Image: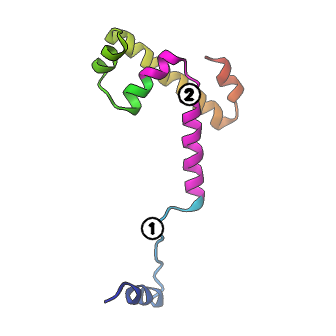
């Protein structure tokens, strides 16, 4: 049976045909969240941003990140913890409308 015929039969039976694309409002929200996160990452101090990008975005192992940056594993973990904390604070502040507060916390 052809796809168009199947679609016609489903419509006649009153079945809703699901659109394969997400709703426009979901796409806009996702795009906005991505922009917000990118801005927050770009505002991180350079040393924290380097570690965050390598660990959490490029998914490199901690030992590799520390080696690439020429720092100890303990330093890498400390920078990553700080980066995640700052990022979380900035994203939370942006979502609640307190972006100025987040800027002053860095």
Q: Which residue is drawn at 46% across and 72% down?
A: 18
Q: Where is residue 103 in the image (x, y as percent from the top left)?
A: 66, 22
Dot 1: what SS? loop
Q: Which residue is drawn at 52% across and 18% down?
A: 46
User: Mark 2 and 1 residues: CB-CB less than 8 Å, in contact?
Assistant: no
Give the quadrant of residue 15. bottom left
Give the quadrant of residue 52. top left
Q: In the rendered structure, which segment of residues is drawn in magenta?
A: 25-51
What color scheme is it?
A: rainbow
Dot 2: what SS? helix
- Quarter holding the N terminus is bottom left
Q: Position of residue 78 (x, y in %)?
A: 42, 13
Residue 15 versus residue 67 in the image, above or below: below
Residue 30 within the segment the image draws in magenta: yes
Residue 75 versus residue 40 in the image, above or below: above
Residue 105 within the segment the image draws in magenta: no
The mark closer to the camera, 2 or 1, is: 2
Return the residue nearer the eye: 61 or 99.
61
Give the quadrant of residue 40. top right
Which residue in the protein does label 1 denote?
20
Which residue in the protein does label 2 denote?
42
């Amino acid at each position: 049976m052809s796809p168009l015929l199947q679609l016609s039969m489903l419509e006649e039976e009153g079945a809703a045909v699901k659109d394969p694309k997400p709703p426009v409002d979901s796409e806009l929200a996702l795009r906005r969240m991505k922009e917000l996160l990118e801005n927050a990452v770009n505002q991180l101090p350079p040393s924290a941003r380097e570690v965050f990008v390598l660990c959490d975005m490029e998914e490199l192992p901690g030992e590799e990140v520390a080696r690439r940056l020429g720092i100890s594993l303990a330093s890498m973990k400390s920078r990553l913890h700080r980066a995640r904390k700052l990022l979380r604070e900035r994203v939370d502040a942006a979502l609640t409308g307190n972006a100025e507060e987040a800027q002053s916390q860095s």
